[in-house]
Image (cartoon, grey):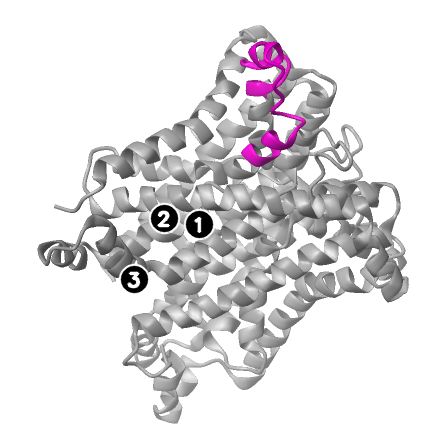
Amino acid sequence: MLPGFGLALGFTLLYLSLIVLIPLSTLFWKSAGLGWAGFAQAVTAPRVVASYKLTFGASLVAAAVNAVFGLLVTWVLVRYRFPGRRLMDALVDFPFALPTAVAGITLTTLYAPTGWLGAPLAKLGVKAAFTPLGIVVALTFIGLPFVVRTLQPVLESLDPEVEEAAASLGASRFQTIFRVVLPALFPAWLTGFALAFARALGEYGSVVFIAGNMPMKTEITPLLIITKLEQYDYAGATAIATVTLVASFVLLLGINRLQAWSARLGVAE
Amino acid sequence: MASLALRARSAPTARATHEPRAVKAALTLAAVGFIGLFLVVPLAAVFVEALDKGWTAYVAALREPMALSALRLTLLTAAVAVPLNLVFGLAAAWAIAKFDFAGKNVLVSLIDLPFGVSPVISGMVFILLFGRQGLLGPWLEAHDLRIVFAVPGLVLATVFVTFPFVARELIPLMQADGTDEEEAARVLGASGFHMFRRVTLPNIKWGLLYGVILCNARAMGEFGAVSVVSGHIRGQTNTLPLHVEILYNEYNFQAAFAAASLLACLALVTLVAKTAVEWRSARARHPEEPHVD
């Protein structure tokens, strides 16, 4: 028997409780104090509902963009050899490593009407910064590593013999990819999409600068929570935060299920 | 790698298992273009904007007292948060990976919890706990203690958001290693500490280093959670990311990007370290294979 179990588990539980569980439970405790009517009123106010719609919609679009381009980037990284591939592979984690405030001010400067990318877009009549489109851009930036890093190990471990078998049975390359390769990647792909989506829902730093933050139009839910806190409306902030937190926990639970499914498929092959 | 093995096969199989050259080129270009537009252009923009008014202005922005105090505070929060979460990560991984007990899966999920919480909420819970209207607020006030809108709050929020990083790297790694080597060390008479230092630690060192690097990057770069608990008191509760925000909102773009460039360098160092660690740990785990993997 190895030593240290009691000490290690005891310390883990104590530290987990002090740092995570007790602080988080304060949220539910405070929100229970509001009463049902107060809670319902706080979380269904028009300005709050508008922020949910925006946050949810923009996160969904960004996760979808990442699902498409993340699959493309993963495919190219795993299957093709070209100069700069290792550099590109390392760069994929850049949004994960870059502090969100830096991402926020940089994207805002780039996509502002006078910026490197905003100016050409403005010529086309597209306004990116301070519109929902800008929010999608920021959320796409931060979500990319989640899709690529979830797909990459699965695509790498895919047995090439399966594709050869499909080809020798007369499948065209197109058929092989769409009927054999992509279905095998699907659970991991969906997991990556869900992870990017979950991250986008709570994202604050990279979005606040580019969003414009107009109530009812470009105000995301995390910002609304901060606004309420700054106005000392702790009850309102608590109620909205509880809804957000429950939504992300449900999502995380779904992601856990997805990962289990993905792992089972891996074993079955 | 797959492509090496495939290259040796006959031409008709290759045609059926590989995309045509033109398709390959198009897909590669599209992927490189996307990465270039979404990742490389922003990276370049940080440094171009930071050096917009020349080297002297860049250095001046970084030597300004507020910038220096923000940098000091950022280093301080990381210096507290990273070792704490490192010790926790080791303890949690030891208990979870080397022993069996009821509720293990629940514990693993609970450790991941901070990743699922919006940074804004991560900061907010500490205000609900320690703020003036908070649970412990009256008691703290009676004893003239300040936690939120002061340095302890910044540190706590940072510890919260960086909580899972080390544990999450170590758990799968130590699970894969199993317990045989440690048990052998014990049978041969090693003390618990000796066993840990000579057997466990060498096996997990690269994963541990990787977890610490990620934890540190997030600790130094955290914005949302820290922004909620800081109260934005200049020179006192401003970390580097908050300093960037204030300068930017004051339209002092060049100085904001100068401070931001430090954080971008931190991100680049993190990426390089990560790549190096991955490379070394791949070699440490399969030393006999030439690097085809």
Depth check, front residue: A162 or A214: A214
Marks 3 and 2 share the same chain: no
Badge 1 amino acid = Thr
Q: Is residue A49 left or right of residue B50?
A: left
Give the CA separation, mark 3 to mark 2. Answer: 27 Å
Q: Residues within 10 Å of mark 3 (few under 14, many from 20)?
A: some
- Residue B142 among magenta residues: yes
* Residue B18, quarter of picture: bottom left
Asked whether the viewer can see residue B164, the reply is no
Q: Circle 2 sits in a helix, a strand or a loop, which is it?
A: helix
Residue B199 position, x and y percent, is 24, 60
> Which chain does the numbered disc 2 sit on?
A
Sequence-first disc among 2 and 1: 1
Badge nearest the viewer, 3 or 2:
3
Give the residues drawn in magenta, as a range. B128-156
Q: Is residue A145 above or below residue A34?
A: below
Task: Give the Cα distance between marks 1 and 3.
Answer: 30 Å
Q: Which residue is mark 3?
A: B203
Classify 10 Å Cα crowding around label 2: few (below 14), some (14-19), many (20 and above): some
Quarter of the figure that contains the C terminus of chain A: bottom left
Q: CA distance from mark 2 to mark 1?
A: 7 Å
Residue named by callout 2: A259
Name the kind of residue labelled 3 in the image: Asn
Q: What residue does disc 1 label?
A: A191
User: Local crowd at mark 1 within 10 Å, few (<14), some, or many (≥20)?
Assistant: many
